[in-house]
Amino acid sequence: MKIKRLIQVLLLMITVFLCACGDSKNERKTATVSYVSEGSSDSRIENERYELSLEENYSVMILRDKVTGEIWSSSPTDENFDRESLNPLWQKRTSSVFQIGYTNIAAGLGVINNAALLQMDYTAAGRLDGDVLYVSYDLLQPGIKLTLAFSLEEDGFRVKVPYEGIEEYGDTFSLVSVAVLPFMGGAADFSEGYYLYPDGSGAIMEFQDIAHIGVSNYSYEIYGNMEKYEEMCTEFEPELPQVMLPVYGVRIGDRGYLTVVTQGEADSRITISCSTKVIPLNGIYGEFIYRRGFEDARVKTSTVLSYASGLIEGDREIYYRFLEKGEADYSHMAVNYREYLQAEGIQYGGDRGEFPLMLDILMGIEEEGLLFDEFKQTTSFEQAENMMSELAAAGTTGLQINLKGYTKGGYNSEPLKFGINSSIGGRGGLNKFLKAAGEAQVPVTLDMNLLNAWDRKGGFSTRTDIIYLGNYTVLTDQDKTLFLLSPEVALERMEKFTGKARSFEIAGYSLSGVADVLAYNYNDGHRYSAEETIGIWREMLQELRGSASKVTVTGGNGYVFGYVDCLKDIPGEDLGFRYTTRSVPFYQMVVHGMADYTMKAGNLSGDLETAMLKWIEYGCVPYFELTYEGSEDLMHTSYNQLFTSRYDSWKEDVVGLYTEMKEAVGGLRSLTMEEHADLSDGLYRVTYSDGTRVYVNYSSDDREAEGITISARSYKVVKGEGS
């Protein structure tokens, strides 16, 4: 036991040493400090609508609406909450404009100290520079300085933490995170209202739902959490929420606001705090990450986090956008965020062509054997052409085909080589299929995963080409068979792929690993921050849009908005945490009219009737993943989740569903969703920008709403005056 313990200690010491080293890009350094000098005492800014002030030695922010007289504060303003009943510790915490997390990196224990402003000895000063109020804080105990910059907008205000205003001058502690206005929007359990957060399609926690009481805080990493590397790498459904938008919302009574992380969102998280006996108050807030903690996989007896020595660079900013009184529901929050995106240049509406039927065709995949892998063919190019011809002849005028598993090694054979599998028809078969598709005016995309690298296929370096975590362990799955490529290697792979793909008459590309995994890299000499990785993806997508008519991605992280035509595999619900009351189509309301999107393939839904109702309610386009042959041969492959896919078995359902949806809701595709309402148990209404209302009834009984009868397990579309 002593020897085992000694080995664990030595491993921990090695980890600490490695995390303290690193290359020059991430060495610990003091930023160029923009700091308000002591003695400066500005504390207020205002515009035509709002007045914002920092009070009580800059510990509390007060925002007053000069039109309505309403007050918002960094301290809870919910009339049902009695702050004076709290103990002194929580009175300090709820009165603090921010709280920080900090750690002793040299100690190597990974312990985070969380402290609110009023729990620390500090000095503060404010300076007005134009329309911006800079307030600088010197936190004496941890030895950290930081600045908050407040600015007003017509509809709210912004809070920025400038990177140049951060200084770590102490010898012991290093900054890990900053949570701004953590108690603004705090609400008691018996208040009316809820929090909206971007878990999957969107989730709501109602204050009066007792299920959340006493539940531990939970933080949503925007665009994903690479610390949970095993779940990130799994080919099956992850147990991690898909957080695709940098937003959250607050509704208390008939007022509320939407919050958008506008800078540094890839290095930020959204935290939900639930009420307890000690503090009967719920909260939601944004938190900026300056150092990420990673578990050391080599230490098995306990959880030890190691932290990078250097700060994650970049400014961070949150934009609080207030909603008009009486318009603080999640529908208005979605409209508000869409208006923000439009102001940022994202385009909605316009001619989007025929209502689409998105069809993935799996050609084949290798089954791993003891000595040799065996290619399992599920569709040849000739068979794919037959499928296309029959579907087109049956009236699927918006058919769009994506080919999967067409290369030599089939699906999941990355690193991808462009050689076309000969058993399914080779290059000649692909050319013949594409010629027929062109004549039938059916767009065809080629599927590609930019990030996956399978050990059994080789063709990459586990030293220089793949992603490492902050504790210098490799990002991989439990079996160490699947790795993720570094962003620059993925980009190089894409350039080689498109160079060869241009010799074929394809419409474009369907990419995985761009919009569903934000894979930043800590590997020495190949380091890429989350923001740098986003920059690489956007540059690549911009180039693809210039050379291809169709760019489709799996996943829907917000940084791809405006760069793609279709978002695939968008969740239709939240992950189902205990504190969540219900899921809502917030994501779909934001995206509809900007890009097409799909949910799970209809043939994998388990209940196609319910799936179609969900597609209609959520504004999705129909999507299937089929094979010409049956899926029995996939049972022992890495793609055995495609358990029912035979074309002959699904053709009639595909054609019937597409025809019905095209006739019923095809004309709504370019419109925006203005409202989603839960009318009663199982009955929902969606209203579009032209006034069209779509009623969806999931119950087994007929339902009536607004003088309209909606049959059981059915829907009804009522055209608007502007349609």
Image (tube, helix red, strand yellow):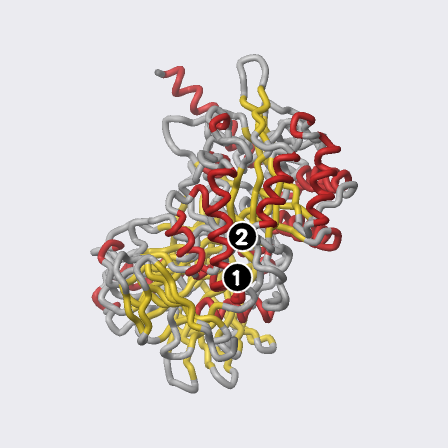
The answer to whether residue 147 shows anywhere in this view is no
Q: Are marks 2 and 1 in contact (CB under 8 Å)?
A: yes
Mark 1 — residue?
591
- Tell me the element at label 2: loop
Which residue appears at 53% of the width and 31% of the height?
A: 629
Q: What whole-number distance in Å separates the C-alpha atoms at marks 2 and 1?
A: 10 Å
Label 1 sits on what residue type?
Val
Q: Where residue 73 appears, x then y in whole percent?
A: 38, 72
Position of 430 with respect to 698 (left or right) is right
Q: Residue at x 50, y 73 (%)?
A: 689
Name the residue located 48 percent from the left edge and 58 percent from the top edge: 661
Q: Is residue 386 visible?
A: yes
Quadrant in which the N terminus appears: top left
Q: Amino acid at mark 2?
A: Gly
Q: Please, is residue 32 above or below residue 721 in the view? A: above
In the image, taking residue 662 as reference, residue 420 lies left or right, namely right
Residue behind mark 2: 556
Residue 369 in percent (x, y) is at 54, 17
Residue 723 is marked as: none
